């Protein structure tokens, strides 16, 4: 009697231990796989050197009326730190010529300088807070500055599912930097090319906040995939913003000199 | 003449037969009531509490729509405000230990208080700073000063920034504030106010109570002591309000029951049914009313607070005539069944008329644009009718129990009844002797009242809703004197196009209007996008105060704003929509009477018209403006409501007495007490608030009851004896007793409102009680005199 009792206790304990281990390992697997997907996506985008993109941003309000902004962004790929970028504002006319130079530093605050043509002055701006709206659009500053750096999030693989006719990895990204406007994001990568197809954003109160759809992907230099149309829908305020890319150019021979404070002034 | 009397008698006989039927089938009636109670309780379960502004306004009202849009664009304008000072520290709020505590407190409030959108104090306020070539937007004390000297340097910077003065720090730097902005507002529907979505609508699970509790708990923690806090604003005010409503609905009802019970014992002695019958009647009419509210989907709001007391008073008063008449019939030796029949024959018709006129008084307010008032009118009126229904059915069941055989009692054995009878005898002779003087006095009273009414103003002040000794009122008064205003008036500039606000013309007009508002003594602080632009301009020019001005160039404005966005500035989200199509100028005014606020609004409007402030469509909103609109609605609906009430009651009286002359004459003693009350309020400079506005309609409906009983009895007596004086005298002697008890019950019940913490309800009770008392005096003295002076029932005749 005693022996059988001992046997059952041991069996139950062993099964419980195995169950805990299985659950633990599933968790570890999910975290590992989430990170692996993000790393692979990042790896596939490495080596583009430099680029320039021109895009139009269309802001659509809740009544359906819209307004346009135009910008150019030059990027210099960096290997030991975050990328450098120079954003130049072309429209609306009142901000034409404004330019923002950003040295990205992963989870540390970026270095940023801004050129204001109305004052003809360059000012360094210091801020950790990137959650504000970008030029009145449904995009925030962090939407532009964060997704290209693997250190900015922690990752968890959730599942595989079909999206836009493609098999996708679905992962959860949680911002690792301070002052994010999001609690988490759910990201869809296609399993073939590791392109981001969709992101659901949840605000700090964990309310379903926005959805970004990345469409019309084109491949450049036979390697780099770029979405030519991004649609951001704000579910809480029923507004949307559409980014349409007119062109992408790669390997223009841009150097560090094209990303210094003097470059800001002559960026027009 | 006999013919004329037939129809009232016929109706009376019908009620008499009903009485007999109830006597024979009392258990059927009881079962029917059990069924009705079950249905009512079922619907009562669907009732929900709603003390929000929602409950006042019709959801389609444009004023309310503007307010909701404003909240959607710029967030809730509800806030909590913690004023603090440290008188025993030499640098007050800028003492380094005090500032450390405030920094931690700010963080604790932001992290722990539910429904908080933002907490701002000197420790974390957004600060635009230019250092050499760097422009920074950061929290003021992001790098916390290490020494007192460093903090004093910060103080010098802060005191040069007009944006902080009067809001976060007083001009003399002795008082500072923590502003807690909320994500919710009193105007939100109940489901948005729950902390735990499945936790139900108990007070402890709802905004603002949950936020208030947490704030108080945090402020009481030992680590934040050594500083004097004065906690006020929408959250504690609305919490106090809700708590008062929650606790006083029950306590006022209990007090009323107690008061009424004592009066009933005083008048009816040890007669058990005389005590328990009216109370059961009232209880059931309350249950039916609450069930009716559930059925109609009405919320339980502030107006419900007065309902139990009012229904108790009216219900008991209604039953008194029946009880007194029944007692009289038993005393003269009628069998129980016959006594019931005769009671209903003579009392049911006037009771029906009384109930209908009282209900009409309530119903006349149903057209009010204030939803809470209009719903109160309907359920209040329905409650009165329920009470009547119960009084002629279930109360009769109560009376049916006991021996059927005649049991004559000494009717006048009760000392109070004896005293009343002696008074009534005296009254009859007084009326006979001084009939002229009484009529002249009444005419003079009317004239004086009209003069007073012309001075009456419609206004209310939420600060004065609470009695002076209450903590909430004392704190608010202190804060208002020490720092500034907490009532929000918002001017929303809508350009209708994206980026429209960047137009310097629009901004100049905002600035102009803001500068004008700043000059007004009621306005303690103003906020707009212009402040931030001026602050940025100053910061971009080395902090030079000469540059604290609006840039002229549209491009520079747009570039400042983009720079502000890129630098992580967040404060502007409270004042401008993110597409820059709408912006708001907010005025914080002191708590004052709504008509004084209306004066400010008009003054601002005149200024806008005169100065062509038309670059954008300007919508006025904010809690302060909702008050002004409420007062407007009260003023407009009051005139209409009074007119409707008077007209309805005249029509009833004319229909009941089938005589225009009788109907109009009966109105003279009815209107006098109401006009006297309103006139006296006018003379005394008292205002009509949203409670007091109901006095006239409720009082007309109630005071007419005495008159109906008296005039009906006089008419019956006249038709019997053919002589006006005799008819008047007999009526006073027989009905006078009940009239006095009826009025005493109402008078004492309405005085129960005095126990409320809400000054507004207490004063309503006192005024209503006085009106009821005046109505009794008018009925006893004036009604008989009018009848035998004007002889409205036709010529006197000799009885054969």
Image (spheres, coloured by chain):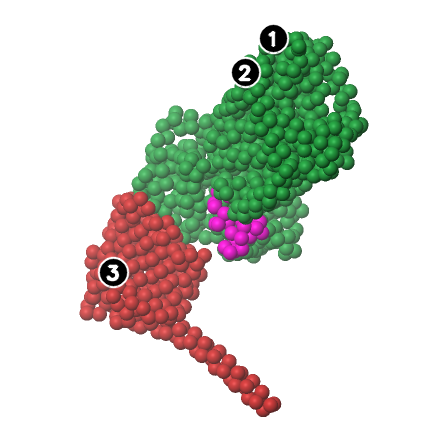
Chain colours: A red, B green
Q: Residue at x 65, y 15 (%)?
A: B720
Of the pair B189 and B351, the residue shown nearer to us: B351
Residue at the spot 74% in from the left edge and 34% down from the top edge: B405
Give neighbour class at mark 3: few <14, some 14-19, many 20+ (Cα, 10 Å): some
Q: CA distance from mark 2 to mark 1?
A: 14 Å
Cα gap from disc 1 to disc 3, whole angstroms: 98 Å
Task: Give the residue number, with chain letter if any, for mark 2.
Answer: B659
Q: CA distance from mark 2 to mark 3?
A: 84 Å
Q: Which residue is mark 1?
A: B795
Label 2: chain?
B
Query: Which chain does the numbered disc 3 sit on?
Result: A
On the image, the x and y values in percent for residue B392 come to 61, 33
The tag on residue A236 is: none
Task: Check disc 2 and report its element: helix, strand or loop.
Answer: loop
Q: Is residue B512 above or below residue A183?
A: above
Magenta-colored stretch includes residue A108: no
Magenta-drawn stretch, dominant element (helix, strand or loop): loop
Q: Which label sits in the foreground, 2 or 1? A: 1
Q: Tell me if residue B220 can be seen.
A: yes
Instruction: Give the magenta-colored segment's residue range.
Output: B186-209
* Identity of the residue drawn at 27% across and 57% down: A230
- Are discs 2 and 1 located on one and the same chain? yes
Residue B741 sits in quarter: top right
Mark 1 lies on a secondary structure that is loop
Q: Indicate which disc, 2 or 1, sits on the residue closer to the N terminus.
A: 2
Residue B695: quadrant of the picture: top right
> Is the C-beta separation of discs 1 and 3 under 8 Å?
no
Question: x, y (%) of residue A208?
Answer: 39, 57
């Amino acid at each position: 009697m005693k022996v059988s009792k001992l046997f059952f206790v041991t069996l139950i304990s062993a099964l419980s231990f195995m169950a805990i281990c299985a659950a633990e390992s599933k968790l570890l697997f999910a975290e590992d796989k989430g990170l692996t997907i993000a790393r692979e996506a990042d790896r596939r985008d490495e080596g583009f050197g430099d680029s320039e993109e021109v895009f139009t941003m269309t802001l659509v309000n809740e009544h359906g009326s819209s307004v346009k902004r135009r910008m150019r962004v030059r990027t210099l790929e960096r290997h030991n730190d975050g990328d450098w970028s120079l954003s130049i504002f072309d429209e609306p006319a009142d901000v034409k010529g404004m330019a923002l130079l950003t040295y990205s530093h992963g989870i540390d605050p970026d270095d940023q300088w801004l050129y204001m043509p109305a004052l003809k002055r360059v000012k360094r701006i210091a801020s950790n807070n990137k959650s504000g709206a970008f030029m009145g659009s449904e995009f925030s500053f962090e939407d532009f500055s964060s997704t290209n750096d693997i250190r900015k999030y922690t990752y968890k693989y959730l599942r595989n599912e079909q999206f836009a006719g493609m098999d996708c990895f679905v992962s959860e990204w949680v911002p690792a930097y301070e002052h994010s406007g999001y609690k988490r994001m759910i990201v869809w990568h296609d399993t073939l090319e590791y392109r981001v197809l969709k992101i659901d954003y949840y605000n700090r109160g964990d309310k379903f906040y926005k959805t970004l759809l990345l469409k019309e992907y084109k491949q450049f230099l036979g390697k780099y995939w770029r979405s030519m149309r991004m649609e951001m829908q704000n579910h809480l305020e029923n507004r949307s913003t559409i980014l349409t890319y007119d062109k992408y150019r790669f390997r223009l021979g841009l150097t560090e000199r094209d990303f210094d404070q003097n470059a800001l002034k002559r960026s027009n | 003449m006999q013919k004329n009397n037939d129809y009232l008698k016929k109706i009376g006989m019908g009620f008499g037969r009903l009485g007999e039927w109830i006597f024979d089938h009392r258990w059927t009636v009881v079962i029917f009531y059990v069924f009705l109670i079950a249905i009512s309780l079922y619907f009562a379960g669907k009732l929900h509490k709603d003390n929000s502004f929602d409950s006042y306004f019709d959801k389609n009202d444009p004023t309310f729509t503007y307010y909701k849009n404003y909240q959607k664009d710029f967030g809730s304008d509800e806030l909590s405000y913690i004023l603090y000072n440290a008188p025993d520290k030499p640098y007050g709020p800028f003492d380094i230990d005090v500032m450390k505590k405030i920094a931690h407190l700010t963080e604790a409030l932001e992290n722990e208080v539910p429904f908080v959108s933002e907490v701002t104090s000197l420790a974390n306020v957004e600060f635009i700073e230019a250092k050499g070539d760097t422009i920074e937007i950061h929290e003021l004390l992001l790098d916390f000063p290490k020494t007192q000297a460093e903090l004093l340097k910060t103080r010098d910077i802060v005191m040069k920034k007009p944006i902080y003065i009067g809001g976060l720090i007083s001009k003399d730097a002795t008082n500072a504030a923590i502003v807690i902005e909320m994500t919710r507002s009193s105007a939100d529907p109940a489901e948005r106010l729950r902390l735990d979505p499945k936790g139900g609508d108990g007070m402890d699970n709802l905004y603002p109570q949950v936020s208030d509790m947490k704030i108080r708990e945090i402020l009481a923690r030992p680590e934040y002591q050594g500083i004097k806090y004065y906690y006020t604003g929408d959250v504690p005010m609305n919490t106090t309000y809700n708590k008062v409503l929650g606790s006083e609905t029950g306590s006022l009802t209990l007090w009323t029951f107690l008061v009424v019970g004592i009066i009933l014992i005083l008048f009816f002695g040890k007669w058990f049914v005389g005590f328990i019958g009216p109370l059961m009647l009232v209880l059931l009419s309350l249950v039916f009313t609450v069930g009716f509210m559930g059925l109609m989907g009405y919320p339980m709001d502030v107006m419900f607070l007065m309902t139990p007391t009012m229904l108790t008073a009216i219900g008991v008063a209604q039953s008194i005539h029946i009880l007194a008449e029944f007692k009289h019939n038993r005393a003269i030796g009628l069998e129980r069944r016959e006594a019931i029949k005769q009671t209903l024959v003579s009392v049911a018709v006037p009771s029906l008329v009384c109930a209908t006129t009282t209900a009409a008084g309530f119903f006349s307010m149903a057209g009010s644009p204030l939803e809470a008032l209009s719903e109160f009118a309907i359920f209040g009126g329905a409650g009165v009718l329920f009470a009547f229904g119960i009084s002629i059915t279930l109360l009769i069941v109560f009376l049916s129990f006991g021996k059927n055989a005649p049991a004559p009692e000494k009717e006048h054995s009760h000392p109070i009844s004896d005293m009343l009878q002696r008074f009534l005898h005296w009254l009859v002779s007084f009326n006979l002797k001084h009939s002229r003087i009484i009529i002249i006095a009444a005419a003079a009273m009317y004239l004086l009242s009209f003069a007073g009414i012309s001075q009456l103003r419609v206004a209310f002040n939420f600060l004065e809703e609470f009695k002076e000794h209450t903590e909430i009122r004392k704190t608010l008064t202190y804060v208002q004197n020490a720092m500034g205003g907490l009532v929000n008036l918002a001017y929303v500039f809508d350009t209708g196009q994206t980026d429209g606000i960047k137009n310097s013309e629009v901004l100049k007009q905002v600035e102009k209007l803001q500068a004008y508002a700043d000059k007004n003594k009621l306005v303690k602080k103003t906020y707009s996008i212009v402040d931030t632009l001026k602050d940025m301009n100053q910061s971009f020019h080395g902090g030079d105060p000469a540059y604290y001005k609006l840039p002229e160039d549209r491009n520079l404005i747009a570039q400042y704003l983009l720079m502000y966005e890129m630098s992580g500035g967040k404060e502007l989200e409270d004042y401008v929509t993110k597409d820059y199509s709408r912006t708001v100028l907010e005025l914080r005014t002191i708590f004052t009477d709504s008509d004084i606020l209306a004066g400010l609004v008009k003054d601002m409007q005149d200024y806008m018209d005169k100065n062509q402030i038309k670059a954008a469509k300007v919508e006025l909103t904010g809690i302060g403006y909702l008050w002004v609109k409420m007062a407007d609605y009260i003023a407009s609906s009051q005139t209409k409501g009074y007119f409707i009430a008077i007209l309805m009651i005249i029509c009833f009286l004319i229909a009941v007495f089938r005589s225009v002359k009788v109907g109009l004459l009966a109105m003279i003693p009815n209107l006098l007490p109401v006009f006297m009350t309103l006139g006296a309020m006018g003379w005394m400079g008292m205002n009509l608030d949203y409670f007091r506005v109901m006095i006239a309609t409720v009082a007309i409906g109630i005071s007419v009851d005495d008159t109906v009983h008296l005039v009906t009895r006089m008419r019956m007596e006249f038709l019997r004896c053919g002589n006006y004086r005799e008819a008047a005298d007999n009526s006073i002697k027989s009905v006078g007793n009940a009239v006095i008890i009826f009025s005493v019950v109402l008078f004492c019940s309405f005085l129960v409102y005095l126990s409320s913490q809400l000054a507004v309800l207490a004063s309503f009770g006192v005024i209503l009680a006085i009106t009821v008392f005046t109505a009794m005096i008018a009925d006893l003295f004036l009604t008989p005199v009018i009848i035998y002076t004007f002889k409205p029932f036709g010529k006197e005749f000799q009885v054969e």
